[in-house]
Image (tube, rainbow, N blue to C red):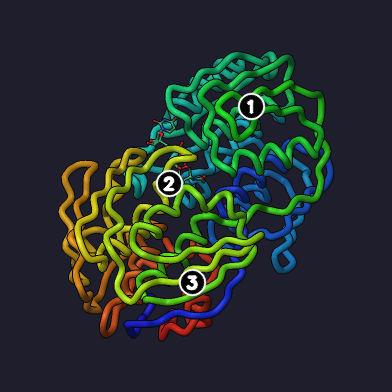
Amino acid sequence: MILIDGPAELSGEIIVQGAKNSTLPLLAAALLCKGQTVLHNCPDLTDVDTAVRILEHLGCRCKREDHTLTVDNALSGCEIPHNLMRGMRSSIVFLGAIVSRCGEARLCFPGGCELGPRPIDLHISALEKLGVEISESGGCLYCRAPHGIRGAYISLAFPSVGATENIMLAAACSEGTTVIANAAREPEIIDLAEYLNRCGSRIYGAGESCVIIDGVKELTGCEHHVMPDRIVSCTYMAAAAVTGGSITLRGVETSHILPMLSPFEESGCQVRQLGGTVSVLAPRRLRAVKHIRTMPYPGFPTDAQPLVMSMASVGSGTSIFVENIFENRYKHASELQRLGAKIKVEGKVAVVEGVERLTGAPVQAADLRGGAALVVAGLAAHGKTEVSGTEYIQRGYEDIAGTLADLGARIREV
Ligand code: UD1
């Protein structure tokens, strides 16, 4: 549980952690590469621990020293059991790498997911185009590539991040050329391509909507620095915003922050970017964030929506949110209401009437970013807020309570 005694006024400097959503596909990619992969700036998170357990289960040796994770690839298995898949739904991204290396893969699926239905149809149909035969039984996916992976033209119906990564991982070592049309353009895709290309792959166009992969015979591991976590950056920026604070984030890739800047500007924050540094100076009272529509990159990210909803909850005026990426991504709204926020949700639209003051209360995190949004709101609330369900938050944040305490908040994790 995270206990917050608010309101806080944050000030100071922090260094932003490495990106969870980059680390997970990079660890899957390490399976493709002979020898050793060394990931620097690797965040210390439970989701990363789960990925490491998957690698170890598959025969790899992993060693963490501070923020450097070394993977010695000795892949010997091709199955991810149910208990490891349950830990992290995004372990689907291991499928492409395993089937490419072993010619077969078996993944057992857990049930539902905290963000509503999370289909994998795009992953499956893309892998089938690359020559993978896939069948499903008893909640497990059985995949075989009897003739190896063969390049293909794949047009994604939606620019899915995970499907784009899975295709890149499956096709990096393959016969022929693969073209992904309508590929996801998220910065994490670029990070993955940069790592793979340094290992010997030939991937062109990552970060654009058409990615071309010329298959190579083999890859050799290398050292790589994981990109900074743009959603974690947004989290601390939102924390500064709701508390009328002034903070500086270091180690940020400022171009990744651009799609998230509009609500900070709309609400009256001054955001200054210089090199890898972002400073946020918030007004005493925020204004409304106005209109947020989540979109694939370079649109406003769905992962930042809950955080900005906490800002809107205390901004003067009305803000409107349209969640276009995931169903069921407003679970934090009812918890914010417990703190006194005025939010109406109707399908994918949420209307937030900003209130002058939130009041501390017990609240329950139901997913990672929604949980972080409750912590952010708790910093603005008067009195004591208890956030439970912190296991969700630990999936993506390295010691959020300690970091906020360093910035001056009265907060601790028990
Ligand atoms: C990744 C991120 C997640 C982020 C999301 C969108 C990781 C580990 N997670 O998730 O934090 O919120 O991108 O930016 O990187 N879809 C299908 N069929 C599929 C795949 C996806 O219909 O086969 C739909 C999903 O249900 C969702 C949308 O496409 O509605 C976006 O999903 P996707 O981009 O695949 O997200 P993830 O890769 O799961």
Is 223 situated above or below 327? below
Q: Nearer the viewer, residue 221 or 235?
A: 235
Mark 2 sits on what residue? 301
Q: Secondary structure at mark 3?
A: helix
Going by the numbered disc 3, the residue's amino acid type is: Ile
Give the mark, 3 or 2, whose residue is nearer the N terminus.
2
Looking at the rendering, in which quadrant would you find the N terminus?
bottom left
Is 102 situated above or below 377? above
Counting other residues with Cα less than 10 Å from the Cα at mark 1, is it few (<14), some (14-19), or many (20 or more)? many
Left/right of residue 228 with respect to residue 362 in the rendered view: right
Q: Is mark 2 within 8 Å of ligand 1?
A: yes
Going by the numbered disc 2, the residue's amino acid type is: Pro
Residue displayed at 42% across by 61% down: 392
Q: Secondary structure at mark 1?
A: strand
Counting other residues with Cα less than 10 Å from the Cα at mark 3, is it few (<14), some (14-19), or many (20 or more)? many
Mark 3 sits on what residue? 400
